Amino acid sequence: MALKFEELAVGQEIGSRSIDVTRQDLVKYAGASGDFNPIHWNESFATSVELPGVIAHGMFTMGSAVQLVSDWAGDPAAVVDYQTRFTKPVLVTDTTGTSEPGAVIEVAGVVGALDVDARTARIDLTVTFGGQKVLMKSQAVVKLA
Amino acid sequence: MTINPDLQGRSYPAAEVYDVGREKIREFARAVKATHPAHFDVEAAQALGHRDLVAPPTFAIIVAQRADARLIEDPDSGIDFSRVVHADQRFTHHRAIVAGDQLRAELHVDGVRAMGGGAMITTRSEITDADGGPVVTTISSILVRGEGQ
């Protein structure tokens, strides 16, 4: 199951994942991270600052998207560098009391580059919501044995 | 209110210690919907060669945002938190964060750039352990929206 650097090729897919998001998930993330900005949990506050509604923390999206890489690498500690630019908000509708998600984030990853000397693979993530990219230049560098 | 242009180059020395606890790692991992056993099960983490539970790759944001708060809450900075948008983020791990770590962050303001009526501010946190060894470097850019932006 351990990944072998020599068996990787640029362009190789590492898999994909759908992440269901509810308003409750955003409250959980707020508590876990300490980021209590009300745009992530209060509709009237969000609309008062000219947002279309409650939006996910950018760091929720970034943090949940990288799990695809942790699982592929087999050890979350192998992710030695991870960066992204936040381009569009993920609008999370209020589905409280139902079993429906308020938003679905789609994540897919490919091997974008290989560094033979460092024995690292750069994984380029495509992260979309409603068909639009919400993260740009989302790259995780994985150190292989 | 305008952003103080003299912020560039300013730094805030490491202050309070952040104690990394197992339950916090588990809580944060659940909050980002992580499922890897190294975040939850000490034996699974140790089987991979780690001293204790491994924090998810973005866990350091807790420490970095506490450091950023020192700048944002500095009355001299001119930053209105309600107008702050997260623009980009990077984590460079010198080693993984594990439960039991005692972390401190030294904050550096690396860039202040006027954008419309607002400003883009880039900060860097150098996060170290109890022995002063480097653990993770985080770089964040925040956009402080000006009026009508």
Image (cartoon, rainbow, N blue to C red):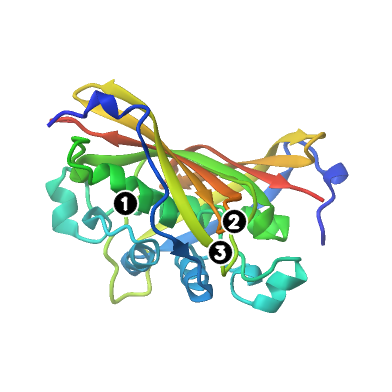
Amino acid carrying label 3: it is Asp
Which image quadrant for residue A124?
Answer: top right
Residue placed most toward the observer, B110 or B16: B16
Q: Report the side of A10 relative to B1 (left or right).
A: right
Q: Is residue B86 above or below residue B42?
A: above
Estimate the spatial distance between the alpha carbons at disc 1 and disc 3, rounded to whole Å.
Answer: 35 Å
Chain letter of disc 1 in the image: A
Q: Where does the image place residue B62, in percent across and percent down from the top left?
A: 42, 57
Nearest to the observer: residue A71 or residue B10: B10
Q: Secondary structure at mark 2?
A: loop
Vertical order, B98 against A123 (above or below): below
Cβ atoms at labels 1 and 3 below 8 Å apart: no
Q: Amino acid at mark 2?
A: Asp
Q: Chain of mark 2?
A: B
| Label 3 crowd (10 A; few <14 / some 14-19 / many >=20) | some
Label 3 sits on a secondary structure element that is loop
Q: CA distance from mark 2 to mark 3?
A: 10 Å
Residues marked 2 and 3, same chain: yes
**Are the residues flagged by discs 2 and 3 in contact, CB closer than 8 Å?**
no
Percent x, y for residue A91? 31, 51
**Marks 1/3 same chain:** no
Would residue B75 be found to the left or right of residue A102 on screen?
A: left
Q: Return the residue at label 1.
A: A91
Disc with the residue nearer the chain's start (2 vs 3): 3
Q: Provide the residue designation for mark 3.
A: B101
Nearer the camera: disc 2 or disc 1: 2
**Discs 2 and 1 share one subunit:** no
Tell which of B129 and A113 is nearer to you: B129
Residue receiving disc 2: B131
